[in-house]
Image: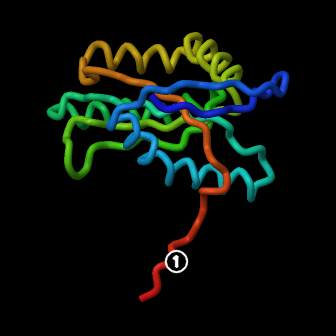
Amino acid sequence: MRSFLRRSGMCDAIILYHVRMNRREALTILAAAPFAAKLHAFALTSGEAAMTITCIIRYQIDPYQREAFKQYAAAWGHIIPRCGGHLIGYFLPYEGTNDIGWALIAFDSLAHYEAYKTRLKADPDARKNFDFAQTKRFILREERNFVEAVDSTFGLPSTLTQ
């Protein structure tokens, strides 16, 4: 079990969190860093406020229905931004495990995420895409984790000299 401190945005109190993390969860967070960094860098250079949390969705998919998952992921490309999420991207398995896909969506806060979920449930295209996934049954399992960026660790270029 790991412990860490986090400053609460509402009343500036310090909250102690205890997190039990397995190897897969740690690798999920590490895998998300390059994509979150690109979004964070874009936000800073475009004058927007940086995203404070990123939802990492890990999908276990039927490897024989990879194209169905790709179609499902592509449909979210216009739905998620319209409903208030900052879509970093969907990712298909490429090398290694052939049944794990990923999605990364950033939000300004958990309150923004909750409002996004409400809009998503009311969106006809979102409902259609959820129905598509349920009918085709290509998503076997879905896990969500929320992570917070460490600003000082993003956008650091390689220092390797040739």
Q: Choose between 22 and 39: the one closer to the eye.
A: 22
Given the current orientation, which residue lies at the most extreme bottom position? Answer: 162
Relative height, residue 71 to residue 114 (above, below): below
Dot 1 alpha-carbon crowd within 10 angstroms: few under 14, some 14 to 19, many 20 or more: few
Residue 100 at x, y = what percent?
A: 27, 36
Quarter of the image for residue 18 reads top right
Given the current orientation, which residue lies at the most extreme right position? Answer: 11
Relative height, residue 80 to residue 34 (above, below): above
- The kind of secondary structure element at disc 1 is loop
Judge from the rendering whether residue 37 lies leftward or rightward of residue 13; answer left or right: left
- Locate the C terminus and report the quarter of the image it occupies: bottom left
Judge from the rendering whether residue 2 lies leftward or rightward of residue 106; answer left or right: left
Relative height, residue 52 to residue 153 (above, below): above
Name the residue rendered at 82%, 23% in the picture.
10
| Residue bearing the label numbered 1 | 159
Residue 113 at x, y = what percent?
A: 63, 23
Relative height, residue 26 to residue 1 (above, below): below
Judge from the rendering whether residue 128 lies leftward or rightward of residue 50; answer left or right: left
Name the residue rendered at 61%, 44% in the picture.
149
- Locate the N terminus and report the quarter of the image it occupies: top left
Name the residue rendered at 27%, 44% in the picture.
93
Residue 85 at x, y = what percent?
A: 61, 31
- The amino acid type of the residue labelled 1 equals Thr
Res. 57 in view: yes
Name the residue rendered at 51%, 73% in the picture.
158
Res. 70 in view: no
- Colour scheme of the picture: rainbow
Q: Choose between 39 and 155: the one closer to the eye.
A: 155
Q: How many marks?
A: 1
